[in-house]
Image (cartoon, helix red, strand yellow):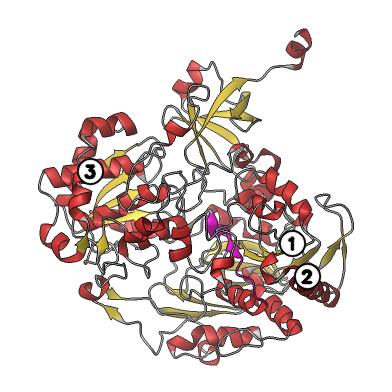
Amino acid sequence: MEITITPAICGFCGGSCLVDLHLQDGKIVKVEGNKTLPFSDGRLCVKGAALKQATYSPDRLLYPMKRVGNRGEGRFERISWEEALDTIVEKMEDTKEKYGAKSTMVYVGHPKWFRPYLTDFANHYGTPNVGSESSTCAYALMLACKCCFGSDVFMPQPDMRRCKTLLIWGVNPLYSNSVKGGKGFLGAVERGVNVIVVDPRCTPTTEHAALHLRPIPGTDGALALGMARVMITEDLYDKDYIEKYTYGFEEYKEYVMEFTPEKVEKITGVPAGNMIKAARLFASEKPSAIMTSASPVVHNINGVQNARAIELLSALTGNYGMPGGVMAPGPGRPRMKGAFMNDWMQRVDPDQDLSHDQFPAWRKLIYYETQVTRIADYLEGKGEYPIRTLLAFGMNHHMWPRPDRIEDAMQNLDFFVNVDMYMNDTCKYADILLPAATSLEREQVEILGPNILYYQPEAIQPMGEVKNDIEILLELSSRMGFSLGDPQIHSYEEYLDSLLSPTGVTLAELKEHPEGMQPKNPAKVRTSEQILQVKTPSGKIEFVSQVLESCKKPGHEGLPIYRDFREQLPMEEYPLILATGSRKPQLFHSRTYRLPWLANLEGTPVIDIHPEDARKLSLENGEEVVLRTPVGAMELSVNLDSSCLPGVVNVYHGAGEKDINYLVDDKYLDPISGFPGYKSYCCRIEKKVMENEQSKM
């Protein structure tokens, strides 16, 4: 049988990397990086290489199903789409009539692309409780950036092409988003940029660093404040910029004076001399840019304030909004209507959602979603009111700490729907399961590079009876008597046309250009002066956040105050710092554990520990031990890893019954964002007691 090659968009980790599918009789037989389309040079990450296994996994959901066993047993039987959709509508309307619409929560995990339409659906239904996995992922960093740079700023990106110094803080682009981010980073390295990396671990990225600072996880804020003190005391900061564009500098200046090099070294473990060199390099060899990641810094109970301290270094040195800095001037990317990270929609009755009172800064700045990190409490009725019905798309409760609590809490639901591509642990608790199409099984419109619009037809025939998420929302809304979108859409094709509408290109036109085409309405060019007209209460970049001060709650100080997480933990009893989720190239949360090609690369999960710590504990490589935290214990194997920071152990998350998140306290949260302290908890490692030894006790 002849093999044909067709381009496709991978989408496995939420990105939009181009691949070539080798098809035989319509089935994938091999996957390679695409070399023919714009901005694609054949790169393929290890996760993309396993796309065939992901597509044809035995865990794929291919038909609508209803539960026939007890919740959690995972026993289902196949039903028709008509029965499934009619049942969902009946149950949701019943909940609305008996308890009010707000007793239904609408949730989306992976993927993210249709989120604005999910909010539109929730608004028509009438519930403000719209949540997502970003309650533990991107939104805390966004919140920090909004406090500094204004409500319209999400995650300001570095100007990789023009910067002279690049400060990479808590991200490893050669593992994370390696096809695109890795390419940009290596391009900057080849150009001769000065690279400073802040990362507790040694990684492929740190090998390119002129300076590698290795702080104890969770102490990033103290390190940033110490660097700021060096810049101020050595007169390396931009006085004119600060006078013109910032607010609260004098108060900030007074505060950072507390963070002497000696104090910072004691807190962070970073040698004072290295911290001073990094501060001088960043402030002197300009333009300078900062690259951060969505999660590592903010997965700490002082995460938002630590992130603010880091982000403000770009303002202190006059690099924010400047060429070669962060949020640099120039043409933007084309805007897509109703696309994630483009359109944020206000919810109905946001002051009645379940998180507004506990997380007021979230309510002010992340106005488009509910903070759902306390979902176990909400399902148990410990909020202002209980959640009775849960409509979820791609929900994975292992995203949160203490997933066992959530498993128990899901038993309280009257009705639960999950839409997913795979049968996962969350699906086992649902009443109705709906099968979602993968990115290969649906048409897509994407922006490649800075400004190329690209249409991707279905790369393979949809399997079973899968539907894409927009189609499911349209089916449900039609049955409920309302339409989505403005203007209204009634089909997936209309959705794609609406998506393209700001570009001036129609879907029909784009289909005629398989190589892609530029938008007819080019993105606007923004100047530095326009960027620096920031949307904060003061109208300036805020060293002292007026939004946080207005919340009048503990931990919501206007200054980026540093608080040490170790002061709130029983470190004497649990002396090792536990960091979860440090990036591994073959893993993407829980999804990749089900793929043999990837799972076989390393026995998972393992405790990555420095050899010196292992020697002190008399541990051998591969030894089975007990990892214990204040909330539980788990048997895992030891992996000696010299890239680890002594005193810190790393365990990747999401491995079913061996998920390390079971051992992280779900009350251990940042008071501003509600994010859990995944990167800086505490633990100890114990020798495993053998059965014959137990019998002698």
Q: Is residue 111 visible?
A: no
> What residue did someone put label 2 on?
98
Which mark sits nearer the N-terminus, 3 or 2? 2
In the image, the segment drawn in magenta is 126-135
Which mark sits nearer the N-terminus, 1 or 2? 2
Q: Nearer the viewer, mark 1 or mark 2?
A: 2
Circle count: 3
Q: Nearer the viewer, mark 3 or mark 2?
A: 2
Give the structural element (helix, strand or loop) at label 2: helix
Where is 322 relative to 423, above or below? below
Q: What residue appears at the point 75 percent right and 9 percent down from the top-left corner?
A: 697
Instruction: Give the image location of residue 183, x and y in percent.
Output: 38, 59
Instruction: Give the image location of residue 490, x and y in percent.
Output: 66, 88
Q: Residues within 10 Å of mark 2 (few under 14, many from 20)?
A: few
> How far apart, in angstroms, are the residues tagged by discs 3 and 2?
55 Å
Which mark sits nearer the N-terminus, 3 or 1? 3
Evaluate if marks 1 and 2 touch, with contact meaning CB atoms under 8 Å apart: yes
Would residue 387 be found to the left or right of residue 168 on screen? right
Q: Nearer the viewer, mark 3 or mark 1?
A: 1
Closest to the observer: 648 or 674? 674
> What residue did someone put label 1 on?
388
> Quadrant of the rendered structure where residue 111 is?
bottom right
> How far apart, in angstroms, are the residues tagged by discs 3 and 1?
48 Å
Q: Amino acid at mark 2?
A: Lys
Q: What residue appears at the point 56 percent right and 48 percent down from the top-left corner?
A: 586
Would residue 579 be found to the left or right of residue 392 on screen? left
> What residue did someone put label 3 on?
256
